[in-house]
Image: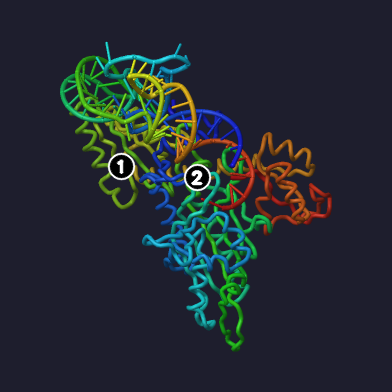
Amino acid sequence: MAKGITKRSDDYSRWYLDVIAAADLAEHSAVKGCMVIKPNGYALWEQIQGQLDRMFKETGHVNAYFPLFIPQSLLQKEAEHVEGFAPETAVVTHGGGKKLEEPLVVRPTSETIIWSTYKKWIQSYRDLPILINQWANVVRWEMRTRLFLRTTEFLWQEGHTAHATAEEAQQETLQMLDVYRTFAQEYMAAPVYIGVKTEAEKFAGAVKTYCIEAMMQDKKALQGGTSHNLGQNFAKAFDVTFQDEDGKVDYVYATSWGVSTRLIGALIMMHSDDKGLVIPPRLAPLKVVIIPIWRNDEDREKLLAKINEMTKDWKGRISFKVDDRDNYRPGWKFNQWEKQGIPIRIEFGPKDLENNQVVLVRRDTSEKSAVSPDGLLERIERLLEEIQTGMFSRAKEFRDTNTFKEDDFDSFKKRIENPGGFFWVHWCGDPVCEAKFQETSKATIRLIPMDGDKEEGKCIICGKKSEQRVLVAKSY
RNA sequence: CGGGGCGUAGCGCAGCCCGGUUAGCGCGCCUGCUUUGGGAGCAGGAAGUCGUGAGUUCGAAUCUCACCGCCCCGACCA
């Protein structure tokens, strides 16, 4: 049925690329590892931006913009940070035909340029907090790239906040993690686990990294967003101090948090099927497409007139489109809009006109229903919500039925390969045991739950005491 | 960086092994007519530096050498 799209069961990774091509989201560019985000893909990003930006502003943040170029010396100021990012930076050595005195790094993230700037802005506690977000592009010279999931250049938002106390910074870190969790669940219909990264997995330069993790349809984990408590690491590296109410001078506390165009990859891998993209209604740039089906010009006119009448007060309330192109037949149109993931299709032909009905077709389940044109908009709005919650429930059920507890390492090694999934295992906290996970199973500790059940147990690797289980999975 | 694959019309490919008129095919595109409830049919038409450079040859998409680029799988990572 779906020509040109590889089945998930045949080749998951080919399927992923086929869905992107079929939905016309993006394509490879002349530069290795970089992509052109096409209008359909960019519209998704705009939806993500729109909702997140609103949520950031509601929590007191403002937008600003910092430069693309970072003097190399700035990037090198925070020891862990430079170690983490130096290998994957692009460096500009020439400008205006001349060799630069100091090379400029194309930002892989903006902590350094921002903290060198915050230093000038902060003198006293009255200057705090600073709650800034920026929407930007960043460049990381990755060895292997995949459209949306990992590209050399990608779009993201990065929040960078400055606080007077450690408590406040921690609160901010958790607040933004919660924003991400809420966004993922309510808009992306993506059930996520939240937790803390291990020392090995945390952001270079952070004290603690928190994350949201979701399960894709191939049962691999995908980190969808991170929120970092940076402590005083960057303040110390950039000498950013402030005077508190009592006149005491201290270093400023920092956080940073971000999500990227990778979320579009997550969206595809969570919800789409062998027919193509499936977009959760709340993020769908186009929610309804109406396809009139005519046999002659007379039909056509009648149908279009009736559609006009039905939709006359829809403008501004719902995004919809009437596909009245005459050079494509209905079947072709059904298929095209299916590939693009439009949540609801309305079929409307002479039979429907006669029976005073329209046919609604859900993209997620392909379920068809004939309904009355009276109260149609309300009916559609309800259906969109049903689709949204249905998509979330199915994704959650899939995740839950593929998440297991495991206490034996040999058994774990087998099960992570087949059938795969998420595994809650006991871990003593030793990085040596963590490294052994990776070497022997190719799985990593995705997160340590923050408020998970405390449960006495034995480390699955070394057998030493463990206080709680951690989430382990293969990941993107 | 290792392994694999590919580069010929907008897209997908055949042709190459075994050199020889005008480089084909499918889809798409343009024109017209007929169609239209799950990817329409017929007729006509436009469209190509065969990745780049050098070499062999009377003659190269095809043989030789070098180079460039991209994709997929692994090691690094959001």
Name the residue at 63% across, 63% down: A80
Q: Nearer the viewer, residue A107 or A316?
A: A107
Q: Of label 1 and label 2, which has the lower sequence position?
A: 2
Give the vertical position of A330 relative to A146 (above or below). above
Identify the chain of the residue marked 2, using the numbered disc in the image.
Answer: A
User: How many marks overall?
Assistant: 2
> What percent of the width, then of the height, locates residue A235?
58, 74
Instruction: Give the residue at mark 1.
Output: A321
Whether residue A381 is visible, yes or no, is no
Q: Amino acid at mark 1?
A: Lys
Q: Residue at x 75, y 43 (%)?
A: A406
Q: Is residue A173 left or right of residue A35?
A: right
Residue A238 place in picture, x, y as percent: 56, 74
- Residue A199 lies left or right of residue A161; in this view the side is right
Q: Identity of the amino acid at label 2?
A: Gly
Residue A265: assigned label: 2
Q: Which of the labelled discs sits on residue A127, or is there none?
A: none
**Nearest the eye: A257 or A114:** A114
Camera-side residue: A367 or A159?
A159
Location of the C terminus of chain A (image quadrant): top right
Tag 2's secondary structure?
Answer: helix
